Image: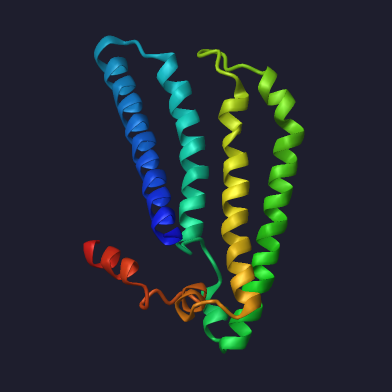
Amino acid sequence: MLAKAERWILRGLEAVLVILLAGMVVMVFGNVVLRYAFNSGLDLSEELSRYFFVWLTYIGAVVVMRENGHLGVDTLVGALGRQGRLICMIISDAFILACCVMLLDGTWKQHEINATAVAPVTGLSMGYVYGVLYFAGIGIGFITLARLVRALTGKLGEFELAEFAGDYSGNPSHDLKGHLE
């Protein structure tokens, strides 16, 4: 049941990413057409496309974290045995959690400043723009914490450890993506 809910949440996040990217494409392309054809443009689309990009980046970071798709030094980790990979994963996850805590702490400290600052064209509170950092810090933190708990309790799947070392052959969803590309 939990896996099904997780799958639906990830699908929802991927849909949000598609909407944000499509919105960026429409706004930027529309602005290019307006500039070439009518020698004008929409300031609103320039500002919103930048904000969409910020949200796209941080929401995408959470989705990619869940899929173990972030960059890593898999050449080194791949050369290690199971125990070495596990130790590297635990150390890496501890660093990631520390970074999430710093991200959330910094976002919290900047919140009041961002909430009172407004965007020049839309008048949108910058708290909405940078509020995505709460989502990214908490999302990546929970994903990492869950993996760390599985690693420390011995419940980590072999495919997860293999993915950490850069081997995605055991994951059917990655194989399907590879076939589609």
* Quarter assignment of residue 27: top left
The residue lying at 48 percent from left, 64 percent from top is 68
The residue lying at 66 percent from left, 79 percent from top is 87
Residue 88 visible in this rendered orientation of the protein? no
Task: Give the position of the C terminus as an image quadrant.
Answer: bottom left
Q: How is the image coloured?
A: rainbow
Task: Give the position of the N terminus as an image quadrant.
Answer: bottom left
Q: Position of residue 81 (x, y in %)?
A: 57, 89
Query: How many numbered discs, if any?
Result: 0
The residue lying at 56 percent from left, 58 percent from top is 143
Query: In the image as oriented, which residue stretches furthest toward the front?
Result: 1
Q: Tell me: residue 18, above or below residue 92.
A: above
Q: Position of residue 93 (x, y in %)?
A: 65, 66
Q: Position of residue 19 (x, y in %)?
A: 35, 35
Q: Tell me: residue 107, above or below residue 143.
A: above
Between 148 and 72, the one lying in front of the other is: 148
Residue 140 visible in this rendered orientation of the protein? yes
Between 53 and 107, the one lying in front of the other is: 107
Query: In the image as oriented, which residue stretches furthest toward the bottom?
Result: 81
Q: Position of residue 147 (x, y in %)?
A: 58, 67
The residue lying at 69 percent from left, 46 percent from top is 103
In this image, 111 relative to 72: left or right?
right
Between 89 and 50, the one lying in front of the other is: 89
Q: Tell me: residue 2, above or below residue 104.
A: below
Q: Tell me: residue 99, above or below residue 166.
A: above
